[in-house]
Image (cartoon, grey):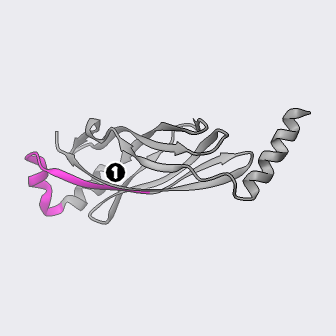
Amino acid sequence: MRLLLFACLLAVATGCGLVESPEFRGMRGWDELAVSAAGGVQGTVLLVLYNPNPVALTATEVEVALSVRGKRVGTLTLPEGAVLPARQEHAVRLAVATDPIGLGRVLGDGLMAFMKGGALPFRAEGTVTAKALGFSKEVPVDVTVNLPMR
């Protein structure tokens, strides 16, 4: 009975806007990605979110595109849902998937500089959806990093 009452109160609070969206705090792990002209970019990055709510949320969906010089070359995906503990910062692991052919086309004239050890400017932009008791909150994500060639 108490659990039902708590769930009803939480549902009312969420519907009234008392449950806030998680905050995007940045991304880590870009420097650990494998970058090559032939294979594209492979690996995982950590999306850092802060949940300001008194209840845990679950990150259920990630729609983040990777682009280079304004051209889409890949995506970040969430392999499985991740729990965002209440009132804590949490790092969510995202898989990086790029299209090596599309990446090669985008590089164009800068390919030689990139192959000689230059950096490639990647932008990750999109949203992460977090849910609690059937209510959704979206978190905007926007970060640009320079990935060195290895």
Residue hosting label 1: 99
Residue 87 falls left or right of residue 142: right
Q: Quadrant of residue 96?
A: top left
**Residue type of the residue flagged with mark 1:** Asp
Query: Residue at point 47% right, 45% down?
Result: 77
Percent position of residue 81, x then y: 58, 38
Report how many numbered discs are placed on residues in the image. 1
Residue 94 falls left or right of residue 132: left
Residue 28 falls left or right of residue 148: right
Percent position of residue 28, x then y: 35, 40
Percent position of residue 150, x then y: 16, 39
The correct choice, above or below, for 143 with respect to 44 in the image is below
Residue 68 falls left or right of residue 109: right
Nearer to the camera, 101 or 148: 148
Query: Residue at point 57% right, 48% down?
Result: 61
Residue that protrudes farthest toward the bottom in the picture: 70
- The magenta stretch is 108-125
Q: Quadrant of residue 138?
A: bottom right
Please identify the quadrant where the N terminus is shown: top right
| Number of residues whose C-alpha sits closer than 10 Å to that of mark 1, classed few (under 14), some (14–19) or many (20 or more) | some
Nearer to the camera, 40 or 9: 9
Secondary element at image label 1: loop
Percent position of residue 93, x then y: 45, 37
66 in magenta: no
